[in-house]
């Protein structure tokens, strides 16, 4: 029995042959008992398979929303509240960052020897020397030779650490040895009221989102 | 049951509509899985996975035979289950006797409508057929389960397992021949009306 004949017999059994092919095969079946025997065997096997009892499903396979990861439908306003929460939270933390950086820029003590910090340091020290009013903004007083002043100021701690105050030279300005004026406290760039407001918006939006989810889940059930 | 309307609603996200389809097809899906896997627990797991997957992917159903589409899903779930089984082998479904041999006819699988003799006869036939099915290569077994046990036509089987019609014809013919040879080994176990010798029914 070749494979082609086997396939023909199997398809004939299932009525899947074209009428012309069926007629040709039937003629061969009448003339060839071996072919007819194989057809009977295939038919018997198929009959046995069809007699297999159909089992009832041991349980229902119906799906729950949890199984398919479905979430309750949320109100249309929900995304707006989510956006508000995210934005308010980001701005809240950003405001702290801005205030921190602003304080650092305004405070000379936190800048050491490096870069432009030294210049602003010198500028602030030079301000009382020039007997300028304290209210004047430091940057507007930028002197023509800031490096000279800065060097002078830097010498002062070293002199103090020596235990003796050397006699001031004739040309040395007395302002250098005078006690430094109390540094001005600069107001934060982002006022506290704004920060409180942002925190409030974030908290209220988050609470409303939670309430919406709870309500939607309850309605869905 | 208006199948098209239910499918449409399920595609819109209606779980209730899909569950109506589940109730209609769950026995077919479970039986297909059972015959491919040969294990009731694994078949139940595969059937459940198949329905979950079917719901998640129902948008991809573009018409035609829904049963064939479901059968493709359950076939894939069975292949996944077989891969899992290969990684983590489990014990056989049949409980052991006191002698340590598998029970052929576990009482908990019995059909209460049959007499004990009929039950034994049916169990022996079923066991023999399942044994022969299990001896087939997976691709042959899948085609036989779809065509001969689920009663699907060649086009539906081809659509379900995505192989050409000619391949279905070839696999089915060879699978039937192998089954016939295997079942001859159980000839003495089978009751007279199940034996293969004379060809049981005319076409």
Image (spheres, helix red, strand yellow):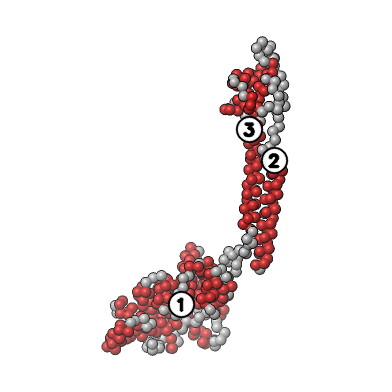
Find the distance from the CA under tag 1 to the CA under tag 3.
82 Å
Mark closer to the observer (1, 2)? 2
Residue under pointer 1: B130
Q: Is residue B146 visible from the viewing direction of this image? A: yes
- Which residue sits at x=60%, y=67%? A65
x, y (%) of residue B162? 41, 70
Element carrying mark 3: helix
Is disc 1 in the same subunit as disc 2? Answer: no
| Labels 1 and 3 touching (C-beta < 8 A) | no
Residue assigned mark 3: A105
Q: Residue at x 30, y 79 (%)?
A: A5
Tell me the residue that label 2 is attached to: A191
Whether residue B129 is visible here, answered yes or no, is no
Q: Nearer the viewer, residue A8 or A147?
A: A147
| Count of marks, rendered view | 3
Mark 2 neighbour density, 10 Å: few (under 14) some (14–19) many (20 or more): few
Q: Viewer-proximal residue, B201 or A212? A: A212
Instruction: Give the residue drawn at x 68%, y 50%.
Output: A201
Q: Output the chain of dot 1.
A: B
Question: Which chain does tag 2 point to?
Answer: A
State if disc 2 and disc 3 touch (CB < 8 Å): no
Mark pair 3, 2: CA separation: 17 Å
Badge 3: chain ID: A
Which quarter shows the N terminus of chain A?
bottom left
Front: mark 1 or 3 = 3
Residues at badges 1 and 2 in contact (C-beta under 8 Å)? no
- Asked which quadrant contains residue A45, the reply is bottom left
Q: Are marks 3 and 2 on the same chain?
A: yes
Dot in front, 3 or 2? 2
Residue visible at 45% across and 82% down in the picture: A50
Residue A111, compared with residue A151, is above or below; it is: below
Badge 1 element: helix
């Amino acid at each position: 029995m070749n494979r082609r004949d086997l396939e023909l017999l199997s398809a004939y059994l299932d009525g899947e042959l074209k009428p012309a092919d069926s007629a040709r095969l039937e003629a061969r079946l009448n003339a060839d008992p071996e072919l007819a025997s194989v057809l009977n065997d295939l038919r018997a096997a198929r009959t046995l398979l069809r007699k297999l009892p159909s089992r009832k499903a041991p349980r229902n396979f119906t799906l729950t929303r949890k199984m398919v990861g479905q979430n309750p439908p949320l109100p249309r306003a929900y995304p707006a509240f989510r956006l508000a929460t995210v934005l308010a939270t980001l701005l809240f933390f950003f405001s702290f960052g801005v205030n921190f950086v602003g304080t650092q820029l305004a405070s000379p003590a936190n800048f050491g020897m490096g870069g432009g910090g030294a210049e602003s340091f010198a500028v602030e020290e030079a301000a009382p020397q020039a007997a300028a009013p304290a209210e004047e903004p430091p940057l507007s007083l930028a002197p023509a030779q800031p490096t000279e002043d800065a060097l002078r100021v830097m010498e002062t701690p070293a002199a103090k650490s020596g235990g003796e105050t050397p006699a001031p030279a004739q040309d040395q300005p007395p302002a250098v040895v005078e006690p430094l004026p109390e540094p001005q406290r600069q107001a934060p760039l982002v006022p506290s009221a704004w920060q409180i407001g942002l925190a409030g918006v974030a908290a209220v939006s988050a609470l409303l989102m939670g309430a919406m989810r709870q309500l939607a889940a309850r309605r869905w059930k | 049951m208006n199948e098209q309307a239910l499918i449409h609603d399920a595609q819109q996200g209606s779980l209730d509509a899909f569950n109506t389809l589940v109730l209609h097809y769950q026995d077919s899906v479970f039986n297909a899985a059972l015959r491919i896997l040969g294990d009731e627990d694994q078949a139940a797991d595969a059937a459940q996975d198949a329905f979950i997957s079917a719901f998640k992917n129902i948008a991809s159903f573009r018409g035609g035979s829904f049963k064939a589409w479901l059968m493709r899903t359950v076939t894939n779930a069975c292949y996944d289950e077989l891969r899992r089984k290969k990684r983590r082998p489990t014990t056989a479904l049949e409980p052991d006797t006191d002698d340590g041999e598998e029970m052929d006819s576990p009482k908990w699988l019995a059909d209460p409508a049959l007499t004990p003799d009929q039950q034994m006869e049916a169990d022996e036939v079923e066991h023999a057929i399942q044994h022969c099915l299990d001896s087939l290569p997976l691709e042959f077994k899948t085609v036989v389960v779809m065509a001969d046990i689920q009663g699907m036509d060649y086009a539906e089987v081809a659509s379900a397992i995505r192989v050409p019609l000619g391949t279905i014809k070839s696999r089915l013919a060879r699978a039937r021949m192998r089954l016939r040879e295997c079942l001859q080994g159980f000839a003495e176990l089978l009751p007279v009306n199940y034996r293969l010798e004379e060809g049981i029914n005319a076409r």
